[in-house]
Image: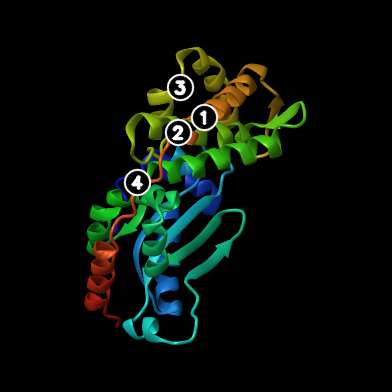
Amino acid sequence: MDIWQSISDEDIEKMRDKVGKTMDIKTVISEKLNEIERKENVRILHCVESGSRAWGFESPDSDYDVRFIYVRPKDYYLKLESTRDVIEWQLDDTLDINGWDIQKMLRLLYKSNPTVFEWNSSPIVYKTTDDWSAVSKVIGRYFQVKAGLYHYLSMAKTNYHAYFKGEQVKLKKYFYVLRPLLACRYIIDNGKPPPMLFSELVEAELESSMKPFVDEILKAKMATSELGTQQKNDEVIRYFESSIAEIEKVIAEYANEEKPSWEPLDKCFLDILGENSFP
């Protein structure tokens, strides 16, 4: 079952400029997914947008970060030989397409890998299936607060130290720090995975005094290329530094959480394999 309702006509018109006037992006991606299924002998269970377009702050020339979960024929999982569990299909100026095997995804879910929760909640869904719906129903059971906080804080700190050394900063890098910091605050306040849309995180977690600064940077970012830069904003930098210190203290106080059961994930995997058929 394909779902295109999440992509507006206005968004599709913008996409046409990147992939050609004769073919819109949903057609391009659909054909790519069909090609992957045919050439790799897989069935794609779920496919979403995962980057700045899903976060809601893409630049005019942002590419499309297409991510998918797939399953192979049952016999593939019975081999003694180690097998690949990723498909890296395309990387160019327009499309970045890759996917994870369902077995890899479920194992990462057991470890509360935040990427799984993000792919499950992306506001832009290119394709999904009933099998994925069954997986989606159990995903929330595997979110662990401490693991989520470590992930997003590490992302914020890594990007902060890498990209904010000079006086000129790429506009998009502000959001590579701000978004994970707001995600941490959301997890602390709600105990569940943060929403993908940056606007929802801002509404829920950003102090009102910071919103004018962030709005200014966001408008500039969305109006310029991926390489657009701006003089470093001292107010935002101070917010980054104080937030990092505050979140580090909160994490230190969290106890380790009890590991959940494998059983629901095993059932999902076996059910998918049992229903799996290929032409």
Q: Amino acid at mark 3?
A: Leu
**Mark 1 or mark 4: which comes first in sequence?**
4
Q: Who is closer to the viewer here, 242 or 118?
A: 242
Which quadrant does the N terminus fall into?
bottom left
Viewer-side label of 1, 4: 1
Q: Distance of mark 2 from mark 1, alpha carbons?
A: 7 Å
Q: Mark 2 touching mark 1, by CB under 8 A?
A: yes
Circle 3: element type: loop
**Within 10 angstroms of label 4, few (less than 14), some, or many (20 or more) residues?**
some
Q: Amino acid at mark 1?
A: Lys
Q: Amino acid at mark 2?
A: Glu
Residue 273 visible (yes or no)? yes
Q: Distance of mark 2 from mark 3, alpha carbons?
A: 23 Å
**Mark 4 or mark 2: which comes first in sequence?**
4
Q: Which residue position is annotated with label 3? A: 206
Which residue occupies the extreme top position in the image?
Answer: 209
**Mark 2 or mark 3: which comes first in sequence?**
3
Across and down, in percent, residue 158 comes to 63, 41
Circle 4: element type: helix
Q: Which mark is residue 253?
A: 2
